[in-house]
C-alpha cells in the first residue's frame, strides 16, 4: 500500500480547529501564540482565521520549546525567530560554499 | 537489557548535587532539542537526556539507582537484582502523558524495568507532562512521529515514492518492550521543496483509549546536486559558453531537471548574465501553486591557446579589437581620494616625528 501525504506549505489552509487538532492543544494556547506574534493568521470574514502549513510548523515548534525547555511564551517566540533566521543563514552559507568551491577550482585552473 | 549510565549521559559525576544535575539537564536539553539542533541523532540524544534526568532528579529514584553500584558501564548487559528497590517508594504513575502529541514518551527498557512504565503521549519531544493518565476512561491522542527524507531535485519535479523505516516500541503479551521496524511506502508528491513537511494523517503512534492516532511528519531534504543549485523554488544552472557563442548568439542544448531544452543565447551576452526560463523551476505542488523559475547563469570559457595556430587567432583578435579596454571600469574609478588620504596620513606621521624630535630639545 502506498500512502499519500499532504505538503504543508503556504497554500495549505488550516482553520483554528485544524491547528488545535494538529498541535493537540487548546484554542487558548493558539490564541496566545497569535497574541505573541508567533502566528499571523489571515482574517477570513465573518470571524474566522486561516493558518498556513508553515504556521502549523511554527506553532508546533513554539509549543514544543515551551513544553520541553520550560521557556515562556516570549522566550519561545524569540527562539522560533532565531531558529528560523539561523536556518536561513545556514542555507545561504551552503550556497556560498558551493560557489566558493567553484571559484577555487576556477582559480586553480587559471594558475 | 543494557545498562544505562545516567551520570555519563548527563556528563556529571556520581557525587553531583541536584542543582548540578538540573543545570546539566537544562544545558543538554537546549543543545539537543530537535527543533534547535541539526544533528542527525538529536532526537535520540534528547530523549536519552530526558530519561536520565527523570531518573536522577528524583532523590528516591536516584538513591535506588545509586545502589546498583558504580561498577556498571553504559551499554553493559544488566539485570536488576530482585531486591534492588527495597525501601524506596516511586513505583507507579507520576510521569504519565497528557496526550499532547510529540515524540512519545518511550523510555528505555532499562528505565521501565527499574521505575515502571511511562504512558505514551505527552507534550513536546520529551513526551512527559505530569498528570495522572492511567485508569479507565482515559483517551489521548497518539504521539506524532517525525522523520527526514532525502530526495533528489529531480524527484521534486516528477514525484517519487520512498520507503520510510520507523522504529516503533511495542509492548508484547508478556509486558516486554520490543522495538519493531515498521516500513511505510510513501508517495512524495511533485512540487515539494527542501525544508518542507509532508503530513501523513494517522500514521503516528496509536492513540490511547479512543484517542486518535498521531500524525507522521516527513521533512524533505534535497541531496546536493552536481550541476543545479536550488534557491527556494528556483533552480539555477551555470552554463559554460564559448566566446563566439556569447558574442554572436547561439542556440544551446541546456539540461533542466524537467528535461532538456534548446535555449537561445542572445548576441553580446556577458558572463554572469542570467537567462530566465519561466516556470521551469520546481513545479507547483497544487494547481493553484506557482512553479519556480529556472535560471541559466552564463559563464564564458576561453579555448586555450596552446599551439601556434591558436595563438595566431588571439593575436588577430587583439589586432582587430585594439581599442577594447576590458578594464574600463577600473580606470573609471577616481584615484584622487585614496591618494589624498595617503597624503594626510603621511603628513600626520611627519608631524608626529617632528614633535618627537622637538621634545628632547625643549
Image (cartoon, grey):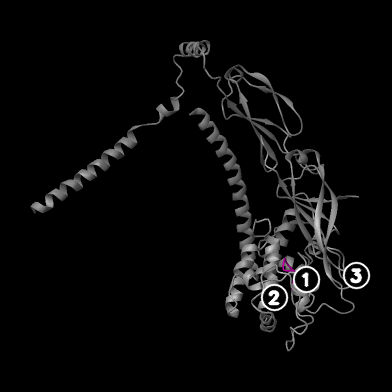
Q: Which range is magenta? A: B122-128
Q: Secondary structure at mark 2?
A: helix
Q: What residue is rendered at 44% in x and 15% in y?
A: B323
Residue at mark 3: B210
Q: What residue is rendered at 55% in x and 21% in y?
A: B302
Could you confirm whether marks 3 and 2 are on the same chain?
yes
Q: Main secondary structure of the magenta part?
A: loop
Query: B294 or B288: which is nearer to us?
Result: B294
Asked if marks 1 and 3 touch (Cβ < 8 Å), the reply is no
Chain ID of residue with mark 3: B
Q: Give the mark nearer the N terminus: 1 vs 3.
A: 1
Query: B22 or B306: which is nearer to us?
Result: B306
Chain ID of residue with mark 2: B
User: Looking at the rendered structure, which numbered label has been put on residue B282?
Assistant: none
Calculate the distance from the C-alpha at mark 1 to the C-alpha at mark 3. Answer: 26 Å
| Res A64 → quadrant | bottom right
User: Looking at the rendered structure, which numbered label has been put on residue B54?
Assistant: 2
* Residue A107 located left or right of residue B186: left
User: Looking at the rendered structure, which numbered label has been put on residue B109?
Assistant: 1
Could one spot residue B267 in this view of the protein?
A: yes
Q: Give the mark nearer the N terminus: 3 vs 2.
A: 2
Q: Is residue B234 above or below residue B3?
A: above
Give the label, 3 or 2, closer to the camera: 2
| Res B328 → quadrant | top left
Amino acid at each position: 500500500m502506498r500512502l499519500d501525504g499532504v505538503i504543508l506549505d503556504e497554500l495549505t489552509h488550516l482553520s483554528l480547529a485544524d491547528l488545535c487538532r494538529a498541535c493537540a492543544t487548546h484554542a487558548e494556547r493558539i490564541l496566545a501564540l497569535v497574541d505573541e506574534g508567533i502566528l499571523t493568521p489571515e482574517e477570513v470574514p465573518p470571524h474566522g482565521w486561516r493558518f498556513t502549513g508553515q504556521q502549523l510548523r511554527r506553532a508546533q515548534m513554539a509549543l514544543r520549546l515551551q513544553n520541553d525547555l520550560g521557556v515562556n511564551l516570549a522566550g519561545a517566540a524569540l527562539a522560533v525567530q532565531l531558529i528560523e533566521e539561523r536556518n536561513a543563514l545556514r542555507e545561504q552559507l551552503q550556497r556560498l560554499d558551493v560557489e566558493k568551491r567553484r571559484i577555487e577550482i576556477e582559480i586553480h585552473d587559471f594558475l | 537489557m543494557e545498562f544505562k549510565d545516567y551520570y555519563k549521559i548527563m556528563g556529571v559525576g556520581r557525587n553531583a548535587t541536584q542543582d548540578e544535575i538540573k543545570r546539566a539537564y537544562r544545558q543538554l536539553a537546549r543543545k539537543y532539542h530537535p527543533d534547535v539542533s541539526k544533528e542527525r541523532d538529536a532526537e535520540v540524544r534528547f530523549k536519552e537526556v530526558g530519561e536520565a534526568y527523570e531518573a536522577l532528579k528524583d532523590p528516591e529514584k536516584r538513591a535506588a539507582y545509586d545502589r546498583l553500584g558504580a561498577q556498571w558501564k553504559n551499554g553493559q548487559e544488566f539485570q536488576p537484582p530482585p531486591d534492588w528497590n527495597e525501601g524506596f517508594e516511586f513505583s507507579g504513575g507520576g510521569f504519565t502523558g497528557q496526550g499532547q502529541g510529540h515524540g512519545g514518551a518511550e523510555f528505555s527498557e532499562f528505565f521501565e524495568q527499574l521505575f515502571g512504565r511511562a504512558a505514551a503521549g505527552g507534550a513536546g519531544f520529551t513526551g512527559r507532562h505530569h498528570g495522572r493518565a492511567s485508569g479507565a476512561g482515559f483517551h489521548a491522542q497518539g504521539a506524532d512521529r517525525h522523520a527526514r527524507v532525502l530526495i533528489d531535485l529531480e524527484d521534486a519535479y516528477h514525484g517519487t515514492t520512498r520507503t520510510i523505516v520507523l522504529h516503533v516500541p511495542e509492548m508484547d503479551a508478556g509486558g516486554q518492550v520490543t522495538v519493531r521496524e515498521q516500513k511505510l511506502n510513501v508517495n512524495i508528491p511533485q512540487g515539494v521543496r527542501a525544508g518542507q513537511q509532508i503530513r501523513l494523517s494517522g500514521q503516528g503512534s496509536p492513540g490511547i483509549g479512543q484517542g486518535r492516532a498521531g500524525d507522521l511528519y516527513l521533512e524533505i531534504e534535497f541531496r546536493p546536486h552536481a550541476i543545479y543549485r536550488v534557491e527556494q523554488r528556483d533552480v539555477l544552472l551555470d552554463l559554460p559558453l564559448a566566446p563566439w557563442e556569447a558574442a554572436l548568439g547561439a542556440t544551446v542544448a541546456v539540461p533542466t531537471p524537467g528535461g532538456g531544452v534548446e535555449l537561445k543565447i542572445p548576441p553580446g551576452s556577458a558572463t554572469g548574465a542570467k537567462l530566465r526560463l519561466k516556470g521551469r523551476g520546481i513545479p507547483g505542488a497544487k494547481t493553484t501553486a506557482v512553479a519556480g523559475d529556472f535560471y541559466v547563469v552564463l559563464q564564458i570559457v576561453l579555448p586555450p591557446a596552446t599551439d601556434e595556430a591558436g595563438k595566431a587567432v588571439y593575436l588577430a583578435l587583439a589586432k582587430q579589437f585594439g581599442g577594447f579596454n576590458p578594464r574600463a571600469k577600473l580606470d573609471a574609478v577616481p584615484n584622487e581620494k585614496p591618494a589624498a588620504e595617503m597624503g594626510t596620513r603621511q603628513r600626520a606621521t611627519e608631524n608626529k616625528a617632528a614633535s618627537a624630535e622637538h621634545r628632547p630639545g625643549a
